[in-house]
Image (cartoon, rainbow, N blue to C red):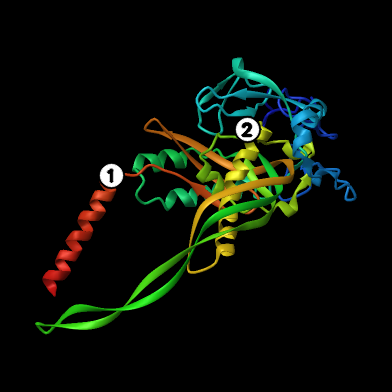
Amino acid sequence: MTAEDGNPKPDGRGESGGVRQFPCSHCGGSLTFQPGTAHLKCPYCGTENDIPLDAGDDGYLKENDFLAALETEEKSAAEAAPVAEAARCGACGAVTTVAGERSADRCPYCGSPLSVQNRQSFRLNVQALLPFVVNAEKALQSYREWIASRWFAPNDFRRRATRSEAMNGIYMPYWTYDAQTSTNYAGQRGDAYYETVMVTVERNGRRSLEPRQLRKIRWRRAAGTVAVPFDDVLVPASRSLPEDLQDSLEPWGLDNLKPFREEFLSGFVTETYRIGLKDGFADAKSRMRPAIEEAVRRDIGGDEQRIDSMDTRYSGVTFKHILLPVWLSAYSYGGTAYRFMINAQTGEAAGNRPWSFWKIALAVVSGLAAAGALLYYM
């Protein structure tokens, strides 16, 4: 139903079949979360409702025991979580919340149609989130500026992407892991030294011998143990987006996490967890490895280092379930999905696009012509 002004008419319902809806006490319309605030607002009459946040409740920051959760806690926590309805995309596999009154929608990650036949229920087993700060207007402005700066994108792509103005606000699922690590290593320490050698050089057509300092490395075996603590190692709990795009949105200000309230989700899409707790920690280990290797190299010392083996033990492993806010535009060009993303907390943007062979070729030819003209002039 629509009102005379063309907007959807408020119906007073408190549930939509997707994420829980919050009816306006004044007109019955669905309240939506306002980025950068701590309240819901009615788009029809402007009524605002504060989101209840208990300043003294820091339970949402609790670090959950990893091993215990693998056995029992994860199951019991999931059973107590609120239920929502989602649809699975047949093209990219993303599972996101849907609006209950629509029989079809489009996947926010690849733009493919979502059918009602692919709907399923899931539990919002989340303990904390970062609310949206960047609003839709700023996200759209950033998107247009990004498109305009893609000089070597095909013209029809730029026109199509500019017309596709829909930016989807999405809460993406993440794990955070804490751990104490202890690593036994074996390797080699390289200390530099220099030897003087005579080399033949040619100057003004005459050859002569001159001394040069030749750098060499003296290697000796090294072994030891390093301890490296980790706090809030961030791991995406889905594979709906390329990992490099997701990582390019970092850093996230996790100090600003808020306790999970369904009110924060109102008006936005939420993706479900597709990477389990155990697999997520395997990913976290790979993200910890560079820091461990760096600690090993520092411990070995010298001018150069070789690491032959590392045996890392993990203890005190804890985790959190969190959601992070992203503005996303997905579009298809030439049978390939392209995406533009904005960190909805910091405004950091990232995206990928196709390249125009003809524009690149024209630029190369123009550059060569300009260089030739300059040489001719000189």
Helix, strand or loop for disc 1: helix
Kindly identify the amino acid type of the residue bearing the numbered disc 1.
Phe
Quadrant where the C terminus is found in the figure: bottom left
Marks 1/2: CA–CA distance: 38 Å
Helix, strand or loop for disc 2: loop
- The residue tagged 1 is 357
User: How would you rate the neighbour count of disc 2 (Cα within 10 Å): few for under 14, some for 14-19, many for 20 or more?
Assistant: some
Q: Quadrant of residue 43?
A: top right
Using the image as rendered, state which of residue 361 and residue 14 is in the foreground: 361
Expressed as whole percent of the image width and height from the top left, the position of residue 336 reads 41, 33
The residue under the point 78% across, 47% down is: 258
Q: Earlier in the sequence, mark 1 or mark 2?
A: 2
The residue under the point 56% across, 63% down is: 300
Task: Give the answer, above or below, for where 353 lies relative to 86.
Answer: below
Tell me: 349 left or right of 79. left
- The residue tagged 2 is 275
Expressed as whole percent of the image width and height from the top left, the position of residue 309 reads 53, 50
The residue under the point 63% across, 32% down is: 275
User: How would you rate the neighbour count of disc 1 (Cα within 10 Å): few for under 14, some for 14-19, many for 20 or more?
Assistant: few
Expressed as whole percent of the image width and height from the top left, the position of residue 131 reads 72, 46
Q: Quadrant of residue 280?
A: top right
Task: Give the answer, above or below, for where 117 lies relative to 18.
Answer: above
Quadrant where the N terminus is found in the figure: top right
Kindly identify the amino acid type of the residue bearing the numbered disc 2.
Ile
